[in-house]
Image: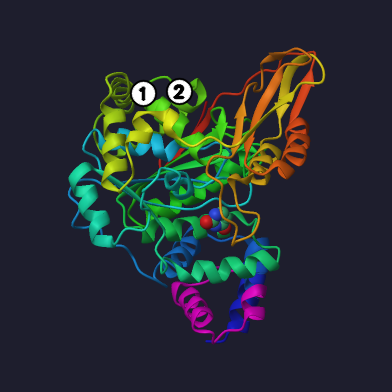
Amino acid sequence: MRMIDLIEKKKHGQELTKEEIKFFLDGFVKGEIPDYQVSAMLMAIYFNGMTDNEMLEFTLGVRDSGDVVDLSSIKGIKVDKHSTGGVGDKTTLVIAPIVASFGAKMAKMSGRGLGHTGGTVDKMESIPGMNTSLETQKFIDIVNEIGVSVIGQTGNLAPADKKLYALRDVTSTVDSIPLIAASIMSKKLAAGNDAIVLDVKTGSGAFMKTLDSAIELASKMVSIGENAGKRTIGLITEMDIPLGYNIGNSLEVIEAAQTLQGHGPEDLTNVCIELASNLLYMAELDTLENCREKVRKVIRDGTAFNKFVDFVKAQGGDASYVENLDKFEKAKISYEVKCKTSGYVYEMDTEKIGIASVILGAGRKTKEDVIDFASGIKLAKKTGDEVKQGDTLAILYTNDESSVKDAETLVLEGYTLSDNKPELKPLILARVSKDGIERY
Ligand code: URA
């Protein structure tokens, strides 16, 4: 087999076979096929897409380039949730204890912050003592004992994806929906769970800026998951507005804990209820409607919050912080961003707000940067709110005084005011399953 013939085939939109895909991925990982030929193949895929079969074989090939986690010693149905990344998205911290409250198992690998979006592992580490790099056996033992554990991704999960992503990054082939779908699903399948709920964000703060592109990505990931024998559902959720009010690591842990205590913001609470209910539905707890009711109940009666406390303790975290949220260290500087005119918040540029939080210290500007867990932003106003000149739009928190002006500029640019009250979109825009697409 010759790589040039496979490129020629894909260039003409013909379907590659399982053997051909395996040949090209193996050769790439071993360094036998040069980057320039793989780059040409990626560009051919970019323009001609991949069939469902190609996507499946490509994803399985990438999955099998490294370890596939064996979770068979965990009893019960193991469910996983993946978010394509947003601003203020602390849903994993809320959903994981809810799901575990019902005996479903959540053995989850999460990521760190990327670009303007935060990551669950960084958020968890803002709780003093919390260990996110447990040995596999300890991770499994905790899931068997309390139903939930969340750790960072292990070093050897889908290494071909890392290599491919680096090449895509410099060949302008990152934004290919089949390549994104295969990249995400290779890691999800390697993580070894039985069922997957994908939270595909759409809007100004998301990778997928339009609803149609988010639905297309979700459909491809559902097709890969189901064809690989895993039950998979995609929810398309709104990211034109940050989720909740708090952005930044310990600020988000605080808001997650408040949500589990039943007094979180409405948008965050509703998205978490929907994601958790779909996970429990896939864990065969009940009908989707009954799962929603059951989820509301464990939030109301304290069961879900108690599970969160157990989860923090099991991973070495000091639970007194989540039991008494005032214990979290405060940033030295808090600065109120004031509104310059009056009207309604018509629109938010969520990506700009996310970047502002990174500038304040909540994310990494370089790979080596150390996160300042206390820094971030508390929004005071969001899309749809009426504002008067001089009102506080947001409060910036940081330990780096020099970051305040740049962050303020970005936050102000992130708010568009108007005399007209905007129509708010639903939070859950669509649900994609093997049975089709439901738009809400
Ligand atoms: N996230 C991934 O893991 N892969 C992509 O290609 C894009 C986003």
Is residue 30 visible in the rendered structure shown here? yes
Where, by quadrant of the figure, is residue 38 drawn? bottom right
Going by the numbered disc 2, the residue's amino acid type is Gly
In the image, which residues are magenta? Answer: 14-40
Q: Disc 1 and disc 2: Cα gap in Å?
A: 7 Å
Q: Residue 34 colored magenta?
A: yes
**Where residue 255 sits in the image (x, y, percent)?**
47, 29
Name the foreground residue: 183 vs 317: 317
Where, by quadrant of the figure, is residue 36 drawn? bottom right
Tag 1 secondary structure = loop
Name the foreground residue: 46 vs 142: 142
Q: Which residue is mark 2?
A: 264
Q: Which mark is residue 161?
A: none
Hey, which residue is sitting farthest right in the picture? 341
- Above or below residue 62? Residue 305 is above
Where, by quadrant of the figure, is residue 294 drawn? top left
- Above or below residue 112? Residue 173 is below
Q: Main secondary structure of the magenta part?
A: helix
Tag 2 secondary structure = loop
Going by the numbered disc 1, the residue's amino acid type is Gln
- Above or below residue 4? Residue 335 is above
* Chosen colour scheme: rainbow
**Where residue 325 sits in the image (x, y, percent)?**
42, 29
Is residue 272 visible in the rendered structure shown here? no
Q: Are marks 1 and 2 in contact (CB under 8 Å)?
A: yes
Q: Residue 119 colored magenta?
A: no
Name the foreground residue: 400 vs 178: 400
Q: Is residue 425 left or right of residue 231?
A: right
Ligand 1 contact, mark 1 (Cβ < 8 Å)? no
Q: Which residue is mark 1?
A: 261
Q: Residue at x 75, y 34 (%)?
A: 408
Q: Residue at x 23, y 60 (%)?
A: 137
